[in-house]
Image: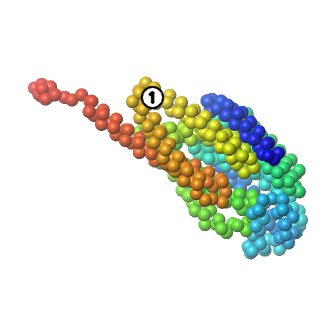
């Protein structure tokens, strides 16, 4: 077993055993009043867009440097990284023109294997926090504490540094310093940003089927765009952009439509209570995303550089803890312990939804994909969609049955009493 694998095992262990109680405590606390009104520039998605623009600009400048200063020969760097890196966009007319006219291209050498080391941590964290803020702004603000984000940045930074040491490029020493700087900056800045109000007060996890489907569509679209960034920008391979253009345009369009739809749904009044099934799905997603924040990156790299058994065990533990927390929350809200019949119906709903969602997620995991993240994302989205559809249908059946029961037991006015009233 390699030293990297052993170190990753330890990182995953610390991330799970320390991260779970830290995040649980944060998610149990009430949200402090925000010091300002909600503004779009407080949202993590806004700053994610800024990081994406900087990464794209760095990739263009790197390509200019590679073509002008290295004449497209990056074989010395390619031998230190996995296959698939450095597919240059050396046939793109705009890039070729820029490479032919850019002055002092030698100054652009810093774009090679260094700038992404500074930006990969905020890119990953802001992506995760954007999804969490979409799902439940209240949970996002609960987790925006120095202890939670400090631990998250420490675990992510250690994980990234272990991968840097495993690759061993000529710039490893510089990259380690840049990643440490990035970790400290994120640990200081992100809690300040998270304490600001990014959504109106009272905005919580989605509770209706339409809201949950909209969230799933938003997450799937953003996930595709993130994987597109990894396959092209973070692997220094702008030459592969063409193969992703159609998918990126579709994902971008879906993301825009889904977020506009989510904003419209937030403004609509909820004219009827949400059933127990959908309430459980919303609460479960909220707890799951919150509890996975700290160990998410370590578990992901454990799959590639460590042991899938360790990764699966750690992931399963987080899922079980999040499920217990969600069930406890929903049970207290529904007071099912006071109604054995309601408890049985609720458990039957959850069992049916879990079976259907498990089958859907299994289909997503077993289907072919270029990256393990693609299979995981596909499985998660299919799990949410299947659970939402089953719970929405069963909630409607339960509501209809309860309505019929109330009608059957409602007092009837006898003909005799009617005659007396007429007299």
Q: Residue at coordinates 44% horizontally, 37% vertically from top-left?
A: 348
Name the residue carrying label 1.
336
Image location of residue 404, percent across then percent down? 30, 37
Image label count = 1
Query: Which quarter of the rendered picture does the C terminus lie within?
Result: top left
* Residue 191 visible in the displayed image: no
Residue 115 vertical placement versus 274 (above, below): below
Closer to the camera in the image, 157 or 82: 82
Q: Quadrant of residue 400?
A: top left
Residue 190 vertical placement versus 79 (above, below): above
User: Tag 1's secondary structure?
Assistant: helix
Q: Residue at coordinates 26% horizontally, 33% vertically from top-left?
A: 408
Image location of residue 299, percent across then percent down? 70, 44
Seen in the image, is 228 located left or right of residue 395? right
The local crowd at label 1, few if under 14, some if 14 to 19, many if 20 or more residues have their Cα within 10 Å, is some
Image location of residue 152, percent across then percent down? 73, 40
Q: Residue at coordinates 55% horizontally, 39% vertically from top-left?
A: 284
Q: Residue at coordinates 58% horizontally, 62% vertically from top-left?
A: 250
Closer to the camera in the image, 247 or 50: 247
* Residue 332 visible in the displayed image: yes
Residue 244 vertical placement versus 10 (above, below): below
Seen in the image, is 224 located left or right of residue 113? left
Q: How is the image coloured?
A: rainbow
Image location of residue 253, percent across then percent down? 57, 60
């Amino acid at each position: 077993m390699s030293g990297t694998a052993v170190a990753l095992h330890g990182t995953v262990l610390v991330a799970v055993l320390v991260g779970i109680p830290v995040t649980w405590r944060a998610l149990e606390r009430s949200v402090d009043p925000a010091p300002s009104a909600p503004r779009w520039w407080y949202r993590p998605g806004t700053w994610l867009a800024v990081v994406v623009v900087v990464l794209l600009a760095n990739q263009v400048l790197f390509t200019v440097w590679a073509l002008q200063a290295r004449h497209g020969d990056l074989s010395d760097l390619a031998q230190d990284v996995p296959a698939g890196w450095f597919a240059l966009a050396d046939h793109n007319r705009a890039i070729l023109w820029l490479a032919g006219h850019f002055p002092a291209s030698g100054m652009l050498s810093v774009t090679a294997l260094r700038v992404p080391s500074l930006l990969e941590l905020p890119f990953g964290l802001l992506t995760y926090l954007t999804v969490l803020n979409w799902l439940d702004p209240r949970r996002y603000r609960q987790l925006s504490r120095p202890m939670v984000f400090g631990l998250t940045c420490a675990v992510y930074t250690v994980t990234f540094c272990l991968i840097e040491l495993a690759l061993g490029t000529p710039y490893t020493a510089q990259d380690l310093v840049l990643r440490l700087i990035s970790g400290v900056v994120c640990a200081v800045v992100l809690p300040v940003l998270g304490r600001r109000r990014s959504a109106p007060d009272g905005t919580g996890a989605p509770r209706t089927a339409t809201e949950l489907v909209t969230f799933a569509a938003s997450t799937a679209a953003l996930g595709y765009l993130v994987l597109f960034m990894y396959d092209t920008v973070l692997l220094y391979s702008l030459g592969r952009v063409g193969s992703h253009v159609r998918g990126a345009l579709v994902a971008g369009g879906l993301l825009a439509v889904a977020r506009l739809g989510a904003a419209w749904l937030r403004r609509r009044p909820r004219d009827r209570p949400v059933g127990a099934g959908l309430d459980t799905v919303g609460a479960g997603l909220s707890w799951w995303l919150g509890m996975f924040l700290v160990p998410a990156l370590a578990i992901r790299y454990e799959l590639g550089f460590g042991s899938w058994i360790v990764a699966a065990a750690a992931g399963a533990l987080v899922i079980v803890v999040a499920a217990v927390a969600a069930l406890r929350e929903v049970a207290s809200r529904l007071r099912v312990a006071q109604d054995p019949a309601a408890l049985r119906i609720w458990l039957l709903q959850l069992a049916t939804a879990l079976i259907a969602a498990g089958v859907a997620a299994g289909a997503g995991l077993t289907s072919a994909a270029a990256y393990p993240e693609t299979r995981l994302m596909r499985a998660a989205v299919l799990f949410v969609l299947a659970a939402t559809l089953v719970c929405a249908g069963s909630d409607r059946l339960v509501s209809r049955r309860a309505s019929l029961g109330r009608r059957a037991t409602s007092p009837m006015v006898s003909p005799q009493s009617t005659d007396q009233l007429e007299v």
